[in-house]
Amino acid sequence: IEASRRARVPCAWMAAGSLKFFDGAEVVDIVDVEVIPITMGGAARYNISNALGALCVSRALGFDAQTIRKGLSSFTSTPDDNPGRCNEFSVNRARVFVDFAHNPHSIDAVVGAMAAVPANRRFVLLSHAGDRSDQDIKDVTESALALRPDIVVAAELEGYLRGRSLGEIPELISSTCLGNGMNLDQIFVAASPTRGVEWIIDQIEPGDLALLLVLSERNKVFELLQHAN
């Protein structure tokens, strides 16, 4: 950033909780991070990076600061604006998040944001397609375990077995959880993501948090959550 400013090259960054843009001549305050919904008040640092990227592209396209401010502050993590990306629902006064993250990097980012959300108990629903190696399955499971969940639901993806046997992926998820210090009574297996979400809805209580890493049946899951209350 300092080198770009010395060279009078346009750039953007965050400082003191605000996104700033240097147009080659002067620095302009664009918007406070806390009013950008997708940053979850600044907890979702990956979406601060995304907002900075959107800011730079928008300025390159000629949009003014007021228009960019309006766009960033009105774009939300809802199934309508951004389906499958940290969509939040309230169920029985618990916070439930649905995300499509399916590799260690993306799960690390989401878990990093969720870790800043206080909760009495934490639930994680996890699944994966069968055309990934055993190590890949273990890696994504361990990324999700960084949230320190009280309960993990391993969901079968019957339509995505891709050469594996029924139960094989949930067993890999379960064994990885056990190998990382969880107990058998903290791990549940569901026949599908929808069944797993139904079970979690029945269990969660006020003050809990659930992270649903849903790779299929997303629309069914949205419908379940929207009608859960």
Image (spheres, rainbow, N blue to C red):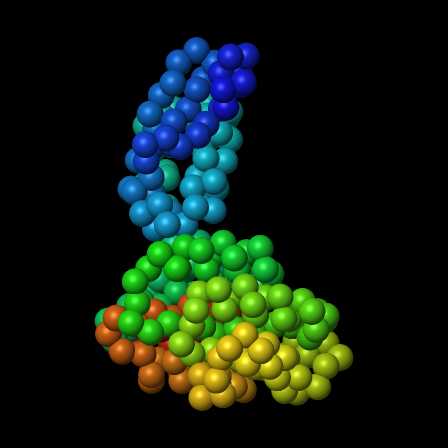
Q: Residue at x 33, y 59 (%)?
A: 117
Residue 125, percent across and down? 47, 74
- Eyeballing the image, is 145 above or below 29? below
Q: Residue at x 44, y 30 (%)?
A: 13
The answer to whether one can see residue 216 in this image is no
Along the horizontal axis of the image, is 200 left or right of 3?
left
Report the front residue among 54 and 139.
139
95 over 48 or under it: above or below = below
Along the line of sight, which residue is nearer the eye, 12 or 6? 6
State the image coordinates of residue 92 (x, y, percent, origin top left).
25, 75
Q: Measuring 53% from the left and 18% from the top, which residue is drawn there? A: 4
Which residue is outermost to the right?
A: 163
Whether 128 is drawn above or below 53: the answer is below
The quarter in which the C terminus is drawn is bottom left
Tell me what residue is drawn at x 41 percent, y 50 percent.
44
User: With respect to residue 95, does 57 lie above or below?
Assistant: above
Q: Quadrant of residue 176?
A: bottom right
Pick the front one: 141 or 196: 141
Residue at the far front: name it.
181
Residue 98 percent across, percent down from the top left: 43, 65
Q: Please provide percent x and percent y for residue 190.
A: 51, 85
Total residue callouts: 0
In the rendered structure, the answer to whether residue 85 lies left or right of residue 226 reads right
Indicate the quadrant where residue 127 lies: bottom right
Q: Is residue 72 visible?
A: yes
